[in-house]
DNA sequence: TTAAGTGTACTATTTCAACTAACACACTTA
DNA sequence: TAAGTGTGTTAGTTGAAATAGTACACTTAA
């Protein structure tokens, strides 16, 4: 179902996150279908269940899956992810705007720049 | 002139950067005045010259000082820093806007949000 | 109630990148 | 030429992140 690339320098859990994210975004899994259990996938890949657990926790944080304790992990609908993602971006814009204002760049100027009406801030 | 706090968990070079940045922003140093040499400051603080070098390289990257090989490091005018800082912020806005567009958020919407005309993205 | 499945928490170990140091080199000025 | 300056390369240290080991807790079905 999924394979680890040991030539890849990235951590194992990150590779797993990335692969499932791609599959889910592509719509390979049906919404609410069950993910492989942490143990079975760990067994299959010959790694520790905690590493799968870490990957699944990250996938949940990103809104790709949801967990029911004692039952398993399940695929959530793509919309959940989009909502989360947009929320994260909004927070980043908030912080960046504050940073810009702290060096004297007004919001009007930022908006104009984003709309392409100004060449620079 | 400056002191290292070994109780502080941050790396030494970062502490040095932060302290000089504060002093320069406050206008304690005249523009074009000479910074302590990497060796003299290293001696004074009983650390390795390379650590000072690293701090100075970062201060130069941020536009606070400039280097003349064989002569020393010198304080640059505050305006240089502002220019650099605004440039960095601009790059961050560029990246963030691309990220937003990749999940379907239009630039018009972003601009409206920044101006407070929309409650969320 | 029990057994076999599920996720979770805690701790220990390993690994790797960041930090710092040692030292040699190159440029500038007097 | 000597004494100051910054720079580059390499090596050692160290602390946080990643992974593993193990025990615990929840869910379901027989």
Image: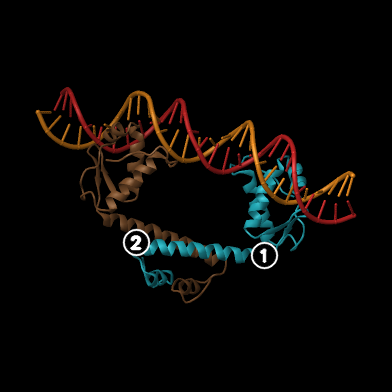
Chain colours: A brown, B cyan, C red, D orange
Whole-percent x, y for residue A17 in the image: 35, 45
Residue in the image at 47% along x and 65% along y: B94
Marks 1 and 2: which is nearer the front?
2
Q: Does the rendering let one see residue A44? A: yes
How many numbered markers are drawn? 2
Task: Determine which residue is flagged by label 2.
Answer: B103
- Quick check: D23 left or right of B83? left
Residue A8: give its label: none
Residue in the image at 60% along x and 63% along y: B84
SS for dot 1 = helix
Residue in the image at 69% along x and 47% along y: B52
Can you say which quadrant of the picture contains the C terminus of chain B?
A: bottom left
What chain does badge 2 belong to? Answer: B
Q: Is residue A17 above or below residue B83?
A: above
Q: Kindly check if marks 1 and 2 are in contact, taking CB atoms under 8 A apart as contact.
A: no
Mark closer to the chain start, 1 or 2: 1
Distance between the alpha carbons at the discs numbered 1 and 2: 38 Å
SS for dot 2 = loop
Residue B78: give its label: 1
Where is residue A88, by image quadrant?
bottom left
What chain does badge 1 belong to? Answer: B
């Amino acid at each position: 179902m999924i394979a680890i690339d040991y030539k890849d320098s990235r951590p194992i859990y990150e590779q797993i996150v990335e692969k499932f994210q791609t599959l889910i975004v592509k719509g390979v899994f049906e919404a609410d279908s069950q993910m492989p259990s942490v143990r079975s996938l760990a067994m299959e890949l010959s790694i520790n269940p905690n590493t799968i657990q870490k990957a699944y926790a990250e996938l949940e944080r990103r809104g790709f899956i949801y967990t029911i304790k004692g039952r398993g992990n399940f695929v959530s609908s793509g919309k959940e992810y989009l909502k989360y993602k947009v929320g994260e971006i909004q927070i980043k814009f908030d912080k960046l705007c504050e940073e810009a204002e702290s060096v004297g760049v007004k919001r009007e100027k930022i908006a104009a720049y984003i709309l392409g009406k100004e060449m620079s801030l």
